[in-house]
Amino acid sequence: MQSSRYSRQIMLSQIGQEGQDRLANAKVLVVGVGGLGSVVSMYLAGAGIGNIILVDSDVVSISNLQRQVLYTEKEVGMPKVECAARRLMDQNSNVRIETVYDQLCADNATELIGSVDLVMDCTDNFAVRFLIDDTCAALNKPWIYGSIGCFCGQVSVFGHTSGRRYSHLYPDRESLSAIPPSSAGVIGPVPGVIGSIQASEAIKLIAGFGQLLENKLFTIDLESLRSMVIDF
């Protein structure tokens, strides 16, 4: 049954059974299960990532439903991590889902990040990204950054084989960390596109193939359909 479920991945020479086994044995932390986290977690569960930890302190609101594809109207007011876990288990009952109904913070970051192989940044604020960056650097863990706003988004990979960090890309930590979580407008497909690229980078990193966005920043503007990869 498992070989049938993942047959369209296993037939790819870049993945094969060995790569699928790596996915099954991996443990990934998804920080934030909003727009980006919805897409990232669904594709990771679909790909057969064996263990996924979801971290979020928010509840589902009606304004989320325009872009946060994990949730339904009936779940408004319920914790996102609980709703997400149910949906992902319905999608793939062979994946182990753990939930943390809390923010990633200085008190829990080391324990949570230390327990996984890879961190997915699906947050909406700079302060948490800098915390992820610091903790992953201290623990030698890779993480995949994603950010969205309006019609645009960005993706990069940090901490895999190089020493380049998020703080190198955005060095003005103090002023950026003071900016509150984003409440800017965004169209639903933007987190769909960026979350899909983040999930693709995660699959490549874990299975061990392809060229990663390490030391590179991918950007796209869906209004103009202009995209680029910037070396940094």
Image (cartoon, helix red, strand yellow):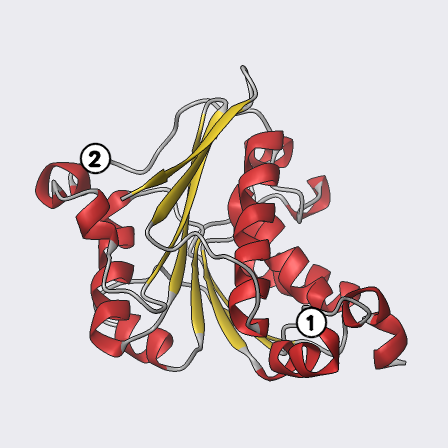
Residue plotted at (38% across, 55% down): 214
Q: Quadrant of the C terminus?
A: top left
Front of the two marks 2 and 1:
1
**Count of marks placed on residues:** 2
Callout 1: few (<14), some (14-19), or many (20+) C-alpha neighbours within 10 Å?
A: many
Q: Is residue 166 left or right of residue 8?
A: left
Q: Is residue 78 visible?
A: no
Residue plotted at (26% across, 63% down): 105
Amino acid under disc 1: Ile
Q: Which mark is residue 147?
A: none
Residue 191 at x, y = what percent? 55, 38
| Residue highlighted by disc 1 | 15
Callout 2: few (<14), some (14-19), or many (20+) C-alpha neighbours within 10 Å?
A: few
Residue plotted at (60% across, 33% down): 62
Amino acid under disc 2: Ile
Quadrant in the rendering for residue 69: top right
Q: Is residue 170 left or right of residue 27?
A: left
Q: Earlier in the sequence, mark 2 or mark 1?
A: 1
- What's the distance in space between the residues labelled 2 and 1, CA to CA? 40 Å
Q: Are marks 2 and 1 in contact (CB under 8 Å)?
A: no
Which SS class for mark 1? loop
| Residue highlighted by disc 2 | 179
Residue sitting nearer the eye, 28 or 197: 197
Quadrant in the rendering for residue 172: top left
Which SS class for mark 2? loop
Residue 205 at x, y = what percent? 51, 67
Residue sitting nearer the eye, 8 or 55: 8
Q: Is residue 6 visible?
A: yes
Residue sitting nearer the eye, 60 or 152: 152
Q: Quadrant of the N terminus?
A: bottom right
